[in-house]
Amino acid sequence: MDPQTASGLNGLLMILRIGITIYCVKRAKTLGWDKWGWGVFAFFVPLIAFIAIQFIRPRVVWYNYPSNQNEEG
């Protein structure tokens, strides 16, 4: 492989890596997960992160409502 082809291939792979990172960050944000963690994970291991984010469920936030202590009953 000549240097010009290798350079073009490396540039294409970097663009693909950045695209997958942006997708994973946006998807993590909509699912309620940490954007920065998924961004770093997707940048360093893009293929595994892309596959993993497809199976992640939305984060469930449980709220603790205070009970009404003033009522006698």
Image (spheres, helix red, strand yellow):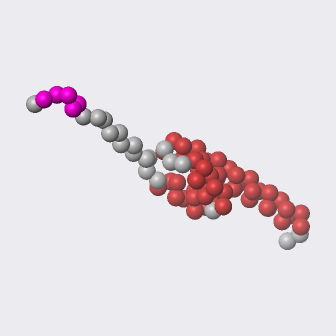
Q: Does 25 sit above or below residue 70? A: below
Left or right: 34 as drawn, with respect to 16: left
Left or right: 67 as drawn, with respect to 51: left
Residue 60, given in percent of the width and then of the height, sits at: 39, 45
Left or right: 14 as drawn, with respect to 36: right
In percent of the image, x 13 and y 29: which residue is there? 72
Query: In which quarter of the view is residue 11 placed?
Result: bottom right
Residue 18, given in percent of the width and then of the height, sits at: 70, 52
In percent of the image, x 89 and y 63: which residue is there? 4
Query: In which quarter of the view is residue 71 placed?
Result: top left
Residue 16, given in percent of the width and then of the height, sits at: 70, 54
In percent of the image, x 39 and y 43: which residue is there? 61
Magenta includes 32?
no
Q: Does 32 sit above or below residue 5? A: above
**Segment tinted magenta in the rendering:** 68-72
Name the quarter where the C terminus is drawn.
top left
Name the quarter where the N terminus is drawn.
bottom right
Q: Does 67 sit above or below residue 36? A: above
